[in-house]
Amino acid sequence: MSEEHHIVPWKNYAINFCVITVLMFLTVWVADQDYGVMNLPIALIIAIMKTLCIVLFFMNVKYSSHLTWVFAGAGFFWFLIMIGFIIVDFTEFGGMYTNSLPGSQSAIGVP
Amino acid sequence: MAVIADREGAYAPPVREENYLTWDHSIKSWLFTQDHKRIAILYLISITVFFLLGGIFAMLFRIELLTPAGDVFEADRYNKFFTLHGVIMIFFFLIPSVPATLGNFLVPIMVGARDLAFPKINLASWWVFNVAGVFALLVLVTGGVDTGWTFYSPLSTSYANTSVFLAVTAAFAAGFSSILTGINFIVTVHKMRAPGLTWFRLPLFIWANYATGVVIMLGTPVVAITLFLIAVERLWGVGIFDPALGGDSVLFQHMFWFYSHPAVYIMILPGFGVISEIIPCFSRNRIFGYPFIAFSTLSIAILGFFVWGHHMFVSGQSFYTGMVFSFLTMFIAAPTAVKIMNWTFTLHGGNVIMTTPMLYAIGFIGLFTIGGVTGLFLAAMGLDVPLHDTYFVVAHFHFTMVGGMAMAFFAGIHFWWPKMIGKMYPEFMGKFACIIIFTGFNLTFMPQFIVGWLGMPRRYHAYPEEWQVLNVMSTAGASILGFGFLACIACLIWSAFWGKPAKQNPWGAKGLEWEVCTSPPHPHNFTSIPVVTEEAYSYTGEEVLDID
Amino acid sequence: MTSVTMGPAEPVIPHHFETKPQHNECNILGMWLFLAQEIMFFGGLFTAYAVYRFKYPDAWEAGSAELNRAIGTGNTIVLLVSSLTMALSVYFAQTDQFKKLVASFSLTMVFGAIFLIVKAFEYHEKYTHGLIPGAWWDPIHPPEIDDPSKMQLFFIMYFIMTGMHAFHMVIGLIIAAVMMIMMLKRKFGPNKYMPVEMFGFYWHFVDIVWVFLFPMVYLI
């Protein structure tokens, strides 16, 4: 039988849906305001909150084993590694793209 | 109360004393089998075909390099040969080699399970692999591909007029099949271990395949999407990576190497696992520092994702990123060295028996150490600038991939051959082939270190005359190496039909596959699930070989 | 033991598992591993998107302005509702409610299909505005930025990312159709709800991708 498996009452799903919908309208509303450089972080934070709602409650990770948490987290974490390193390379201060290394631009021996 | 479905169903234990090879001889029972052992054999056949194919291309371009002038093949054809050699060897031999054959066969048995967690997905993996193989063969008949296995843009997207699309599709599909295998391994190791088999009682081969599964799962999809973008750019004619059309080719290299550097750990980690089994068995010694080897495996898997930029020191990567990657690359040498040290200490004080697998394993330790140490040269950002894209790099990765992985693969195949096939290979022929391979390998790639250091760039079909001696040595070595591989494969195939039947535990080895399973194993692996009460590698020095 | 109206009367355990919880945990873990690799798959696209957005912020702003935010918002709601009905389907399968299961699972498919149809109209609108990259590129409102050609890159990424998302939805709908047939044959029930739950994981994941796509493409 399924007693080992947590059955979540349907009301939880309904509440979760309402929260996500509210967050969605929030992100649309926020997009019309101008917070300068904070536009992107705010949108991403709301998207992450929505994701957490879906992952934890629709996908029942909240009631899953720690192992599920680890691998669900690993996917997101490895994505951050990839995008982190690559974006840092493209935003590099004083890197090859600007040819403004301290000393000379040929310090690394490559054109 | 639970119904146990299928236990008497699809492959119920027959009344007669049968093993997984003999219980059903029909073609259908092989092609649509869900038995991990049979899938391992199917994979073994597939990758042997591709291994020979890749080897033929290697021989062809080594013939061209006999003479300084480009006289046997024109440059275009030469480019196609080394590209096909690379694509086939990497995506169709090295990546599936140990996990898909020995891993598929041994992971469930070593953890004391009746099968992998998802047998159908395991079968699907083999089918997807063969579909990928068909695409690879289509590449051959449609004129080949000449971009190098790296598919660098804009060469692959705007300039190459060869079958790039088919080639990236083949690599994409092969990657997908490896993802299915990787997921299966992770779930099996986590959830299907026999009672008493705690993490630190697992054989190190399991740790290695588990870590490989993690790398496959997190890395392969990135190269899949990257190759997909290459295909889109080619078919659609829009600029995603081509700078002339507004894209960025450095981004391609980042995304490509995010997978393709960890991919070398996909290739080598299972080899480490094989060596960790063979060394203690034929030293009759407990493995030295079990937890260190186990954790070094995991740390290689994780650190492997932080070093990809060392392929891009001269590709327009920014200076500080290069410094970070150089530093991190140095780091990854530490866990690898830990393993080499531990194997050496296992040999120390052991009662070493020189069987064929042991010869391969000891060869592995020496060759892989050379490959690893020369990797440190290339990891140093300053030294990489002159050495980048020279034969030094070629020699380095062939020492790790052929001297390391191919040696480990053949070591493992010989070691578990009695278990997989139930026949003993002829010991003298095995040793003979091993020594031929070792000699030929060194003669092929040692001169390439020198010629690379002198500055010969890779991927050219002509070169200045002063390098001819070294290149002739290398080609001579390649023919010896090729002969050695053929001798080895012929000897194994011969023994599968006419070899002496193997006893249950011919090596006097420890482990569930030797101590509990018959040779070859029962279709269900175990008549009843074993209970594990001791650690792996509890060798006492008293074990004897059980060969007629 | 109470009898159930749908699905097997008792839990079915494939031959290579020992217990039902072991079977379930394997399914859940395996599905999460699959989703982790899906995250990395879409992660590659998001990385490319982020790099180009960083390099060409003006073109990205101009491109984003070409999109119809109302349609995007509407489609987001459609997808969220389908996620809700999907979650409820799992609940109804677990609690042996056949009619509600079929109803909510059908609704999931219907909303998924609506999403794709709306998407198709949206693509068509882009076509009429000359915003298909490549040979058809001929925007009727060329952006007033330094290098208008870079807006093409935005639309390349837009079409690839939303297209890959739509492709996952199509795959999902095909699987859902097969599952619907099995469901009507009462193959799933309290003793066999894992396929429904696993499909739900996939469906929710596709939803999560959209949760990120929507603000990144339409809003900012």
Image (cartoon, helix red, strand yellow):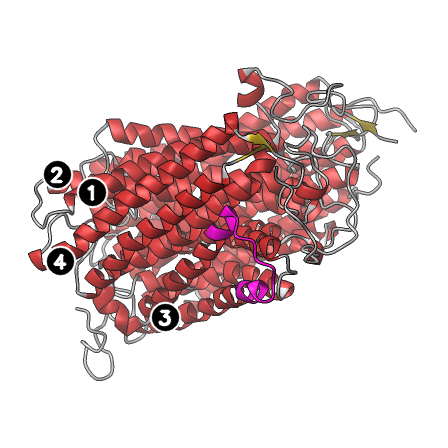
Residue B488 coordinates in the image, percent (x, y)? 41, 39
Does residue B358 show up magenta in the picture? yes
CA–CA distance in space, label 2 to label 1: 8 Å
Q: Which chain is home to disc 4?
A: B
Q: Give the residue at x 24% y 79%.
A: A101
CA–CA distance in space, label 4 to label 2: 19 Å
**Mark 4, residue position:** B467
Q: Is residue B313 left or right of residue B408?
A: left
Tag 4: amino acid? Trp
Residue B322 coordinates in the image, percent (x, y)? 33, 70
**Mark 1, residue position:** B61
Q: Which chain is home to disc 3?
A: B
Q: In the rendered structure, which disc, 3 or 4, sits on the residue that comes first in sequence? A: 3
Q: Secondary structure at mark 1?
A: helix
Tag 3: amino acid? Ser
Quadrant position of residue B535: bottom right
The magenta region covers B342-359
Q: Which quadrant holds the C terminus of chain C? A: bottom left
CA–CA distance in space, label 1 to label 4: 16 Å
Q: Are marks 3 and 4 on the same chain?
A: yes
Q: Secondary structure at mark 2?
A: loop
Residue B6 coordinates in the image, percent (x, y)? 74, 24
